Image: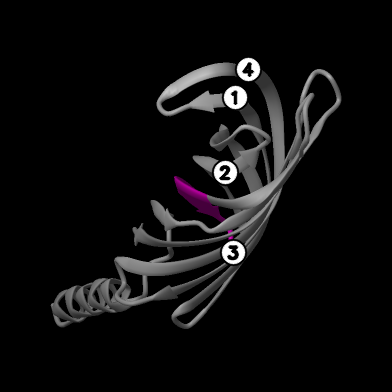
Amino acid sequence: MKKIPFILILLLSIQVLKGQETKKDHYSGGMLFYQPGYTFAQNEFQEIKGNSNAIGGILRFYFWDYFTCGIYGGSQTTFYTSSGSENSYMKLGYGGLFAGGSFKSGRWRFTASLFAGMGGIDNLHIEQQTGQILDRAYLFDYSVITFSPILSVDFALTSKISLTFQTICLTSRTQDKKLFYNPSVQLGVLFNR
């Protein structure tokens, strides 16, 4: 008879101790809201170099102790000066999958991964403009495959919210073999579970 209460207390104690264990992260995702970068590209008329700004998002799933994979995407725009206007721009929209390694130590998480996905480049190149009227302009539209390494450091503000700092270098190549590079820094907020 004395064994039954002992076994019940033992089982209850094990459940309480299991409930106090720190839960393993399953995923984190959120908005990358500040993304300054610099674009190196070219079109049929000139080389394009200039500051870019972007917005995007990421969703990471964590497996085992050190593996992560998920989805990642965004849109970045670079305005540049052409021979006839200051309103020319090049825009890259991209999205796809990534996989890599992740290590968590206390409130910090370090991640290194590789991204590959589809994208599109829109380039409005203005050669001549009078006021609001485009006298001579060219619109280039390319489908591209985009690659990038992703290096990130996350800091957990709480168990549910983290700040993230990422560095990337978006790389694409158009059908006519013109290259597009955009190294960027990304800051954002991630929600964890």
Alpha-carbon distance for marks 4 and 2? 16 Å
For marks 3 and 1, the one nearer the N-term is 3
Give the labeled residue for mark 1. 128
The colour scheme used to paint the residues is one colour
* Front position in the image: 148 or 171: 171
Dot label at residue 138: 4
Q: Quadrant of the C terminus?
A: bottom left
Task: Give the crowd class for mark 3: few <14, some 14-19, many >=20 residues within 10 Å.
Answer: few
**At numbered mark 3, what does the secondary structure look like: helix, strand or loop?**
loop
Q: Is residue 111 above or below residue 90?
A: below
Magenta span includes 60: yes
Say which of marks 1 and 2 sits in front: 1
Q: Residue at x 60, y 24 (%)?
A: 128
Type of the residue with mark 2 = Thr
Q: Is residue 171 above or below residue 128?
A: below
* Count of marks placed on residues: 4
Alpha-carbon distance for marks 3 and 2? 39 Å
Left-right relation of 16 to 86: left
**At numbered mark 4, what does the secondary structure look like: helix, strand or loop?**
strand
Task: Evaluate if marks 3 and 4 touch, with contact meaning CB atoms under 8 Å apart.
Answer: no
Give the labeled residue for mark 2. 78
Type of the residue with mark 1 = Gln
Please provide the residue range marked out in magenta: 53-64
Give the labeled residue for mark 3. 65
Q: Is residue 73 visible?
A: no
Left-right relation of 163 to 152: left
Alpha-carbon distance for marks 3 and 1? 57 Å
